[in-house]
Image (cartoon, helix red, strand yellow):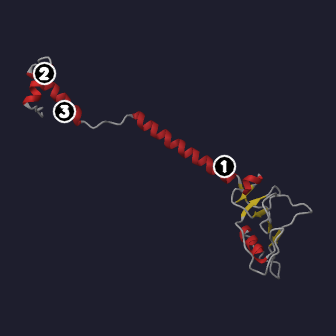
Amino acid sequence: MDQLTLTSQERSLLDATAVPLSEERRLQLADFVLTEIDQPRKRSRRTFGILAAVVAALTLTGGVGAYAWIAHSEAPKDPYVVYCYPDATSVERGPDWFGGMVTAVADVDGNNKPRLQAVAACAESWRLGGTHLPDVVPTGEDNPVPELTACVDEDGYAVVFPSDPTICTRLGISSLA
């Protein structure tokens, strides 16, 4: 057993303020104090329980968020048609609609009809001047291409807007998966 060593000044201070202890009692207290100092503190089951609950809650939250994102993303019903919009004000395509439609074309034999990549197809339409702002006249074959975002409209068609990725949510339609 380790002995508690005190300086003579500390011993006289203890002797003056404390109730006199027998030598046996003093050794018991010193042993108790040294044992308590030496033992590492054990983690309680409660700490592990709280940690497990936090990890489970974070996992569940991430899973629900991922499901919500996936559930709000769709694939177009016709992967061979893309509508390219000149602005991001409306998803309607009425008789006054001004925009571009890109359609995949099969080869000479009627085979090998390619599935369209919506954003790439509309970017090419913008670059060639097929889609442009209503008050802008396209110039040649190298027109500016704005940031484009693909969505799926209520009819199930791929639609591409010159806007940031939040446009689908703002218009109340799904993102293109």
Which quadrant holds residue 120? bottom right
Horizontal placement of 101 versus 38: left or right? right
Residue 100: x percent and y percent?
Answer: 83, 69
At 78% from the left and 77% from the top, the residue drawn is 128
In the picture as drawn, the residue positioned furthest to the left comes out as 8
Q: Are marks 2 and 1 in contact (CB under 8 Å)?
A: no
| Residue at which label 1 appears | 68
Q: Give the labeled residue for mark 3.
A: 34
Q: Quadrant of the N terminus?
A: top left
Q: Residue at x 10, y 27 (%)?
A: 11
* Element carrying mark 1: helix
Q: Position of residue 87 (x, y in %)?
A: 79, 63
Q: Amino acid at mark 3?
A: Leu
Q: Earlier in the sequence, mark 2 or mark 1?
A: 2
* Residue corresponding to mark 2: 25
Task: Report if residue 115 is visible in the image.
Answer: no
Q: Residue furthest top?
A: 19
